[in-house]
Image: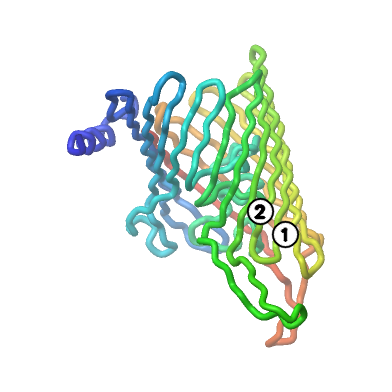
């Protein structure tokens, strides 16, 4: 069976995208393979033009019918391992791996390394590289400050290595979702002598647990569709830090036009300093001119507690060569204003905390799915 499965996987990978991706099906077990190969020509910030692997990924899904409406499932996603200086030849790594059970008309419960509720609530991200208002997609090869200006966006976790995830079936257009996120690292405890309490105290280390709840609504009437999404979450960042997030999304579509508006407020609660927060909103649109052409764009603004603002927008066009092969071009730009300053310890000069120059990104990509 193992040899047959391997042969089938290889054959499927070489087959045309129009063929089915089921590589094994027998006795209630179904194994499917699919993925996308992405190549990107990019120029970001002050870097030269470079050819990059653009998050290519390969999925292996397994479904096992247990009986009646109950199904067990598992999934694994592997991606090419990338480095800033060697983007195509550093092996592969497991990006997602989880398993669970699904009950028809009720929902599914899964355990493992997977996406969370926070990854599904956005409605305004039609871009390829600009991304949305969550941290997902912030990190780009070869850059560190692009989009966030060096700031860590704790905010709403869009994925984690240890997640218990529940997603309901659809009820009259509504879907409900919930996550419990365990710390990525193993639980550890430390015992030390507290002088103030005059006794030994035990505390937990690396406890970055959290939870999320989400509600999603989708309704279609003739050529008009509407979707509204809401999510709430709390995440322990590290000892003494906790982030609380509230997100709302509203999307519309009418024939060839799609519109979306997303809002996210993160309140980073600290036990020993003042509260810190950041508020982001993004408007996005996409218009299908006529198959296979489409154009899209987005505008995003993020405001921090110290009144620093990061504003950016994107414009792009995509062309679908075949049903499974598309190409695109995109321009992204961001600029920070009202940047906070501090006194450099070495030079004793007043310097800006984050870059003040406009940051631009130019992209041309090719994506093949099978």
- Identify the residue at horizontal 57%, vertical 60% (top origin): 45
Would you identify the image quadrant in which residue 243 lies? bottom right
**Do the residues bearing badges 2 and 1 touch, measured as CB atoms within 8 Å?**
no
Q: Is residue 149 above or below residue 74?
A: below
Secondary structure state at the residue bearing disc 2 = strand
Residue at the disc numbered 2: 235
Q: Which mark is residue 237?
A: none
Residue 278 appears in the figure: yes
Q: Is residue 270 left or right of residue 101?
A: right
Secondary structure state at the residue bearing disc 1 = strand
> How many numbered callouts?
2
Residue 315 appears in the figure: no
The quarter of the rendered structure image containing the N terminus is: top left
Q: Is residue 26 left or right of residue 357?
A: left
Q: Which mark is residue 336?
A: 1
Residue 339 in picture, x, y percent from top left? 76, 65
């Amino acid at each position: 069976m193992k040899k047959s499965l391997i042969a089938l996987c290889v054959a499927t990978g070489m087959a045309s995208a129009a063929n089915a991706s089921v590589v094994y099906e027998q006795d209630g077990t179904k194994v499917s393979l699919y993925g996308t190969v992405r190549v990107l020509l990019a120029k970001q910030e002050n870097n030269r033009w470079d050819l990059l692997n653009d998050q290519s990924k390969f999925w292996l899904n397994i479904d096992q019918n247990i009986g009646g409406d109950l199904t067990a499932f598992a999934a694994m996603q592997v991606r090419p391992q990338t480095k800033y200086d060697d983007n195509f030849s550093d092996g592969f790594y497991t990006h997602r791996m989880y398993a669970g059970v699904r009950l028809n008309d009720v929902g599914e419960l899964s355990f493992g390394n997977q996406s969370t509720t926070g990854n599904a609530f956005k409605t305004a991200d039609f871009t390829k590289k600009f991304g949305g208002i969550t941290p997902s997609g912030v990190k780009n090869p070869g850059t560190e400050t692009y989009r966030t200006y060096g700031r860590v966006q704790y905010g709403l976790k869009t994925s984690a290595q240890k997640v218990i995830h529940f997603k309901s079936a659809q009820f009259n257009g509504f879907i409900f979702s919930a996550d419990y996120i365990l710390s990525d690292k193993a639980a550890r405890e430390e015992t030390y002598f507290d002088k103030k309490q005059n006794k030994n105290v035990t505390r937990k280390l690396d406890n970055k647990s959290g939870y999320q709840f989400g509600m999603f609504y989708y309704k279609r009437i003739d050529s008009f569709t509407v979707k509204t999404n809401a999510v709430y979450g709390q995440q322990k960042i590290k000892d003494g830090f906790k982030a609380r997030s509230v997100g709302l999304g509203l999307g519309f579509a009418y024939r060839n036009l799609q519109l979306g508006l997303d809002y996210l407020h993160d309140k980073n609660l600290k036990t020993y300093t003042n509260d810190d927060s950041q508020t982001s909103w993004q408007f996005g649109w996409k218009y299908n001119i006529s198959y296979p052409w489409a154009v899209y764009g987005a505008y995003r603004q993020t405001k921090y507690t110290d009144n620093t603002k990061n504003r950016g927008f994107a414009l792009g066009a995509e062309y679908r060569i075949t049903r499974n092969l598309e190409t695109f071009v995109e321009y992204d730009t961001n600029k920070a204003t009202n940047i906070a300053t501090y006194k450099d310890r070495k030079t004793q000069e007043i310097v800006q905390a984050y870059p003040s120059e406009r940051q631009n990104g130019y992209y041309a990509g090719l994506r093949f799915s099978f």
